[in-house]
Image (spheres, rainbow, N blue to C red):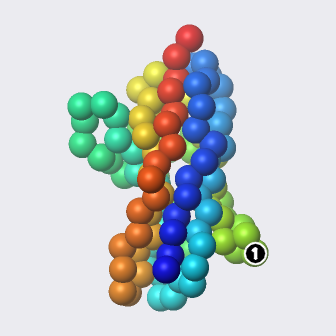
Amino acid sequence: QVQLVESGGDLVQPGGSLRLSCAASGSLFSINTMGWYRQAPGKPREWVAITRGGITNYADSVKGRFTVSRDGAKNTVYLQMNSLKPEDTAVYHCNIVTAFNNYWGQGTQVTVSS
């Protein structure tokens, strides 16, 4: 059974950086997409970055500030977040869609505040 576990969320000042991790356990086959999403209080979940076929697309709100990377040996996907803004405050979730299933992690809280 596949599980996704996010970590790395924290309280950070505006302009700061964080790196989120998403560790996948279990066997993953036929991956279609890997993505990061976020949900702020009172708002719907929104996509942040989605990787398909080795190409990552970023939401306009994070483009140039966030970067996705992957360590295949560790089965871990990272989201490097720089120049953080208060509006980046949200619970961040990773997502993997395969030909057979749609997996979500439990989320990690990122709070950007002075």
Label 1 belongs to which residue?
A: 73
Residue occupying the point 58% across, 69% down? 24
Left or right? Give the position of 22 relative to 34: right
Kind of residue at disc 1: Ala
Image position of 18 with respect to 12: above or below: below
Image vertical order of residue 71 relative to residue 68, above or below: below
In the rendered image, residue 1, in percent from the top left (x then y), is placed at 49, 80
Evaluate whether residue 2 shows in this view.
Answer: yes
Q: Which class describes the residues within 10 Å of circle 1: few (<14), some (14-19), or many (20+)?
A: few
Q: Quadrant of residue 88?
A: top left
**Residue 3 coordinates in the image, percent (x, y):** 51, 69
Please state if 5 lies on the left or on the right of 40 as rendered: right
Q: Which residue is rendered at x = 34% and y = 34% of the image?
A: 40
Residue lying at 53% horizontally and 83% vertically, measured from the top left: 28
Q: How many marks?
A: 1
Tell me which residue sits at (58%, 79%) in the image. 26
Please tell me whether residue 44 is drawn above or below residue 13 in the rendered image. below
> Is 62 positioned to the left or the right of 44 in the image?
right
